[in-house]
Amino acid sequence: MIAQADTFRETVLEEWTNDRTVHAWRNWHPKILIQLREMTEAIVEAARLEPGMQVLDIASGTGDPALTLASLLSPGGQITATDLSPGMLDTVRENARLEGLDNVVFQQADAENLPFPEATFDVVTSRIGAMYFVDIQRALGEIKRVLKPDGRIVLTAWGPLETNVYAATMLTPFLARVEVPPPPPGAPQPLRFAQAGSLGGELRAAGFTNVDEQAKVITSRWPGPPEEFWNHFYDIAVPFQPVFDGLPRDERDHAISEVIAGLARYYDGEHVNIPTSIVIAVAQRSTQ
């Protein structure tokens, strides 16, 4: 099990810190802000932020939702944006500078080993990051440690493929052409917490209280044509790239054509407005 966990960590580190991944997320950041706005809004609502709070965002990527949250914490509040990748954090710094935000600090960090004192933060958030916490219980234990008593944790993850029009549209044409073995139990992968109750169950097992897990369907609004939406998805969907690239050229071209045709059903001439299933889980650190 230890060897397998180490292999998982190496995979996550390679997938999410290499220059190609960082460049893709940096390149698409302005449009991803629009695409995932409703997910960020769900986090904002669940976090119950107030001016003056100290907030930790884990797996911040290129800065969303951290920079959105930062704007809600003034005066007196601060957000700490963290990521495994120095390249991602450099991008967050630049985006914070462009937005004129001066209440954001940056720290390279692994969720399993958070470099912060106990009871530092009022709220901890992570948008579609928890699926990649290799030892989820160790990570949640660290989050609980750095939360103040009664502090809140807000996590989001992708919902199940069968109810997720966005993911199904992007992936089904490929999965119909190649047999992908199921991931090992506990493996870090995008649909790890898609099953109802799984993310909330992890929070309960870690000793959090007032756990509330909900499935939501939001609208992903991509500000551009279907072809561009596919190009973006290919660039950032790092765990699936071996599936996309493993097909023979003609089969791959057919699959991409089916993806684009599926996206076109939701294109209004300006945006691709596609239903997207997510899971949002909220809990508190006990005062005990």
Image (cartoon, rainbow, N blue to C red):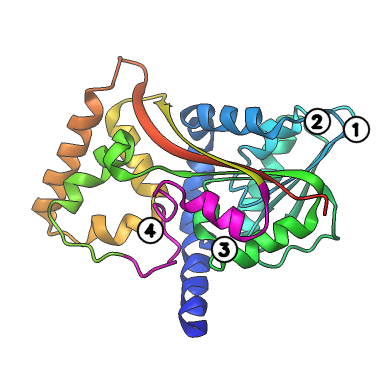
Q: Nearest the camera: 214 or 99? A: 214
Decide: few, some or many residues near mark 3? Use Cα within 10 Å; few <14, some 14-19, many ≥20: many
Q: Is residue 268 left or right of residue 57?
A: left
State the SS at label 3.
Answer: helix
The residue that disc 3 covers is: 136
What kind of residue is marked 4? Pro
Whether residue 22 is visible = no
Q: Nearest the camera: 68 or 210? A: 210
Point out which mark residue 239 bears: 4
Q: CA distance from mark 3 to mark 2?
A: 28 Å
Q: Quadrant of residue 216?
A: top left
Which residue appears at 59% of the width and 60% of the height? 205
Which of discs 3 and 2 lies nearer the camera? The answer is: 3
Residue 199 shown in magenta: yes
Point out which mark residue 76 bears: 1
Q: Which residues are magenta?
A: 183-209
The x, y position of residue 34, in whole percent, is 50, 27
Give the main secondary structure of the magenta stretch: loop
What kind of residue is marked 1? Gly
The x, y position of residue 261, in whole percent, is 17, 30
What kind of residue is marked 3? Ile
Cβ atoms at labels 1 and 2 below 8 Å apart: yes
Q: Nearest the camera: 224 or 117? A: 117
Q: Earlier in the sequence, mark 3 or mark 1?
A: 1
